[in-house]
Image: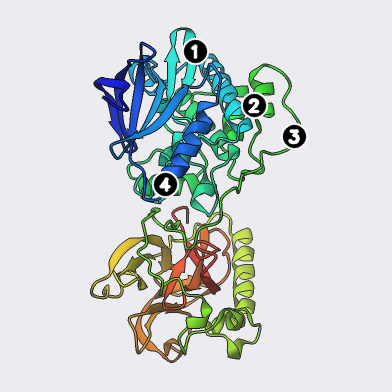
Amino acid sequence: MVADRYVIVGELGRGGMGVVWRADDRVIGRQVALKEIQVPPGGLDRVLREARTAGRLNDPGVVTVYDVLTDRGSTFVVMELVEAPTLADIMAAQGPLDPNRVAAIGLALLSALEVAHAAGIVHRDVKPSNVMLLPGDRVKLADFGIARAMDDPGHTASGVLGSPGYMAPELFNAGYPSPASDLWALGATMFHAVEGRGPFHRDTTAATLHAIMYEEPRLQLCQGPLADVIMGLLTQDPYQRWTPAQVRQVLSGGPRLASTRPVDPWADEPKPGRRKAFLIGGAAVAVVAVATTSAVLLTNSGQQDGVASAAAIASTTATTSALPTMTTTTATTTSSTTTTTTTTTTTTTSKAPPLALLLLTRYANPKGFHYSGTPKAAVPTGFKAEGPLGSLVAKPEPGTVKFYSCKMKTTDDHFSSLDQTGKCEGQTTVALLGYVYQSKPSGVVTIPLYRCNAGASHFDSVMANCESSKVVKEGTLGYLVSTGG
């Protein structure tokens, strides 16, 4: 018996967010779904507030939340019991669905999302297994409010709640869940329904996240207006993503809207400190929890001697920069790039040999120090891989410079350097790891790599904000070759 009212009669299912029970409501005399959820420390008030907000939603396309309560240390959400297969179940049994059917399901889901967004609720986890299909393809979208409330870093490797294959790219780049990110998930769900496969599903979570950030999904079974809608919803930039009005206009058979006001991402929560997620654009993407301490989160005031400050990196005077070649190699890089472009133009029948690459991986140790390395150097004792950042070039190429691994003389702080003398800015030289492009080269897919200063330690990141507003970005180390290169 839960709360002296609900008698549990069986288990309906379980997942990363908790267990769902079938229960008898002894007061009303009906059966309900009772979801027992794991609440993170200090998160109960938020769970209660947002679940109660979800309970105010009144739409036939939403699984109704009746109540939220605590009993003997456990938290339960009492919901409408809907006994119907999910869209995932239907696809598993039937394969890809008819485009007209997918369009109708998409419109119904859109209506449910619009009701929620108008009430200030973001779903966060729109996906086929949360879409229930009743007779006549009537839609019920489950778990409204719960996903928004349950910001549990253990739910995904990134610390961002949701199912990776349906999560918008901005959620992995310091963005917050918003109506626009729900619309992305709607597009991914519709893609899956009409194609029989997720747009970004890969063999590993890392590869899935890389696909979301850097690959364009390709529809093979779907064309016409539905394809336009799906691709419009899967637009990378949330401000350019299709709006509900655009989707409805096209799926309802009307002319496509030329332009409408974009759906603004919400920013109703204070920005966190250093993000526990980082995006990596090499042979794969790895999103891992980064062990951090108060020392790691210090600002530039705690910076060690011998490593440049943000002001020094930003300086246009080469002699004051701790990355001495960043300024002096710019002209050379531009010249080399121009020469390469000219050669390509005049020799269109020849194909350049593939680049020899060295995967650059970021590592961390329990003390919060980081190290970036390639197979050319042994991994320091106690450091474990967080994930690949991208690739260095194995041999000198036009527009590249030497990329060194260095270590502070007095601490275990490792950092990457472009000191072409090999002296690591006065610190200890670990190894020459490879060569990095100093500007975006022609004909090679690359991503920028930044050197970040957390005060007590340094680390490399492909995120322009260094994964936190509390970390100083010292400068751009160069451009790594990504999977597409």
**Mark 2: amino acid:** Val
List x then y, in percent, for residue 88: 38, 23
**Mark 4: amino acid:** Gly
Residue holding disc 3 = 260
Secondary structure category for the residue under label 1: strand
Front of the two marks 1 and 3: 1
Residue 14's quadrant in the figure?
Answer: top left
Q: CA distance from mark 3 to mark 4?
A: 37 Å
**Mark 3: amino acid:** Thr
Residue holding disc 4 = 43
**Residue placed most toward the observer, 276 or 379:** 276
Residue holding disc 1 = 138
Residue 426 shows in this picture: yes
**Disc number for residue 209:** none
**Mark 1: amino acid:** Arg
**177 relative to 364, above or below:** above
> Are the residues flagged by discs 4 and 1 in contact, CB closer than 8 Å?
no
Q: CA distance from mark 4 to mark 2?
A: 35 Å
Instruction: Tell me which label, 1 or 2, sits earlier in the chain.
Output: 1
List x then y, in percent, for residue 356: 39, 65
Q: CA distance from mark 4 to mark 1?
A: 34 Å
Residue holding disc 2 = 247
**Tally of numbered discs:** 4
Q: Residue at x 37, y 16 (%)?
A: 85
Instruction: Tell me which label, 1 or 3, sits earlier in the chain.
Output: 1
Q: Is residue 102 left or right of residue 245?
A: left
**266 relative to 59, above or below:** below
Instruction: Tell me which label, 3 or 4, sits earlier in the chain.
Output: 4
> Are the residues flagged by discs 1 and 2 in contact, CB closer than 8 Å?
no
